[in-house]
Image (cartoon, rainbow, N blue to C red):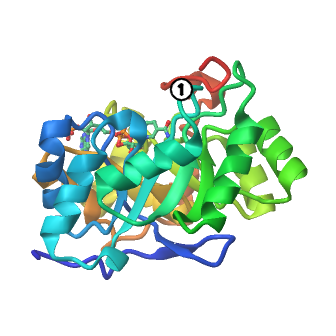
Amino acid sequence: MASTSTNVPTITLNDGKTIPQLGFGVFRVEPELTAGVVTDALEVGYRHIDTATGYHNEEGVGQAIAASGIARDDIFVTTKFPNNGEASAADTLRQSLDFLGFDHVDLYLIHWPRPRLGTALSAWQDLIELQREGLTTSIGVSNYRLQDLEQIIGETGVTPAVNQIELHLEFQQRELKKFHEEHGIATESWYPLGGGELSTAPALGEVAKAHGVTPAQAILRWQLQTGNIVIPKSSRRERMAENFDLFGFTLSDAELDALAAIDQGEGGRRGSHPDKL
Ligand SMILES: NC(=O)c1ccc[n+]([C@@H]2O[C@H](COP(=O)([O-])OP(=O)(O)OC[C@H]3O[C@@H](n4cnc5c(N)ncnc54)[C@H](OP(=O)(O)O)[C@@H]3O)[C@@H](O)[C@H]2O)c1
């Protein structure tokens, strides 16, 4: 291996398990390219991979991990249940494990709450059962809104370990993040770099320049220092390395404040709205 992941901090989840705070996402990585891309990411040093049934590339993730020679226990793998009414969580997770070549995943998330189907709660009850069966170590949700979180916690008494949500400089999700902090839910950012459209805010350029880093590195460092789990994606090895090289500089409180001011609230949202899926 070219490098190790020893610099990456871990976050302790509300179930006592740990997750590397910096991981690698594989959304929109073509299935036939995934094994190669994930092999590069592992060689760069990533030990946390984020995939989903909906990405159709779990097989490539599993192949890269199997071929890497790295112990399964040394790599944290997340996948996600679509909750789209097509198949049960139990069948879907078993299919994912088959594709990955694993007997369990480290984190299983419900990809979307699907208010139109009304299955935010029943899917959560299913994940609680799958965790009991040992098919996933930790369980969480993704794109759950405040009302979804209140519902599932209120009805089951089980708090998700993670809520993976769209979160970047323009869309900082203050209200939801506050709820997470109050309830011990770890915040995981998707579109951590803004989905590839990096912020052009002057404050970002100034912060990056002050530290001699790229805007992407400044954004990801901001994500880490504000406590988020972060899973940037790149198909290019040099950018994988750039996005992993975040531990040689620290943003000051004044710089964090300047970046906080880039938030545009709801107007900064770029991805799908959970109300609408
Ligand atoms: N739960 C959900 O609903 C949900 C939704 C979306 C994403 N996710 C997860 O979050 C992960 C990250 O989100 P994302 O992949 O959509 O967006 P992202 O990580 O914010 O951005 C990825 C894009 O940025 C580009 N990029 C990467 N590094 C860069 C750098 N250093 N400088 C400039 N551009 C750079 C990539 O292009 P190249 O590949 O060409 O480098 C790619 O187009 C996904 O892979 C997935 O695992 C989850």
Q: Is residue 266 left or right of residue 151?
A: left
Taking the image as four quarters, which one is ligand 1 found in? top left
Residue 154, above or below 11: above
Q: Quadrant of residue 11?
A: bottom right
Q: Position of residue 100 (x, y in %)?
A: 31, 55
- Residue 258 visible to the viewer: no
Q: How many marks?
A: 1
Residue 181 sits in which quadrant? bottom right
Q: Position of residue 214 (x, y in %)?
A: 25, 51
Residue matched to label 1:
86
Query: Which residue is nearer to you in this view: 223 or 90?
Result: 90
The quadrant of the picture occupied by the C terminus is top right
Q: Position of residue 275 (x, y in %)?
A: 68, 21
In the displayed structure, would residue 65 be above or below residue 93?
below
Q: Is residue 199 left or right of residue 167?
A: left
Pinpoint residue 63: horizontal percent, then vertical percent: 18, 57
Question: In the rendered image of this protein, does residue 265 appear above or below residue 217?
Answer: above
Q: Measuring 32% from the left and 66% from the top, which residue is drawn there?
A: 246
| Residue appearing at x 29%, y 60% in the figure | 101
- Whether residue 79 sits left or right of residue 71 in the image: it is right
Assess disc 1: are there few (<14), some (14-19) or many (≥20) residues with their C-alpha within 10 Å of its C-alpha.
Answer: few
Is the CB of mark 1 within 8 Å of ligand 1? no
Q: Three-letter amino acid code at disc 1? A: Glu
- Residue 1 visible in the shown view: yes
Element type at mark 1:
loop
Q: Residue at x 51, y 44 (%)?
A: 91
User: In this image, 180 relative to 59: left or right?
Assistant: right
Q: Nearer the viewer, residue 157 or 245?
A: 157
Q: Considering only vertical position in the picture, is 194 above or below 233?
A: above
